[in-house]
Amino acid sequence: MRITARPTIITAVAIASSFAGVGAAIAADAATPTTVTVTPVPTLHAGDQAPGDAPGVKAIRLRKAIPAGYVLLGQKVDVQRGDQPAGAALRFTCPGDKRLKTFLITGQAGIAADRPYRNHKSTYITSVPSAKLKQASGVVYAVCR
């Protein structure tokens, strides 16, 4: 009996060891996830202070009152980068009969527009901060008039 028991124990130990090796290999391959959070921010109206300069719209300037007829719709983007850079697709729709004029960015929320948006009622853009940053946060405002 000892002769048959010994190979069974050795086989069981070998199988257990191989599973432990597989578990360690899986753990070594586990990637750190990138977390992207998008939250709305209060809409800015005429009379509110502009959070920055709006490219192409001379009427919207940092710390100056937003002129009548303009509305700034905002979305805050927070990114905690893991192993792979990632960002967010953001949709903006101007209220009423207003149209998009430009985008104003604060913080480190980089943006890219892959389609024409000027004078459109709504559009999608992407917000992807620099891949060099482990943590980035910023607000993207659609300037509507």
Image: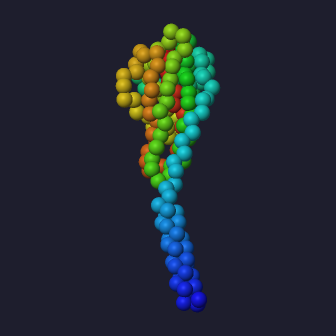
Rendered view: 22 above or below 3: above
Q: Pinpoint residue 61: horizontal percent, then vertical percent.
A: 51, 25
Q: Compare residues 92 and 52 and report the one nearer the observer.
A: 92
In depth, the one of 41 and 62 nearer the eye is: 41
Q: What residue lies at 46% left-to-right and 36% top-to-bottom?
A: 127
Q: How many marks?
A: 0
Outermost residue, bottom side: 2
Q: Which residue is located at x 49 percent, y 62 percent? A: 26
Task: Describe residue 111's horizontal placement relative to residue 19 as left or right.
Answer: left
Horizontal and vertical percent for residue 30?
50, 58
* Quarter assignment of residue 44: top right
The spot of residue 83 in percent (x, y) is: 47, 53
Task: Please determine whether, in this image, residue 64 is positioned above or below residue 3.
Answer: above
**Does residue 22 appear in the picture of this structure?**
yes
Rendering quarter of residue 48: top right
Q: Quadrant of the N terminus?
A: bottom right
Is 136 situated above or below 14?
A: above
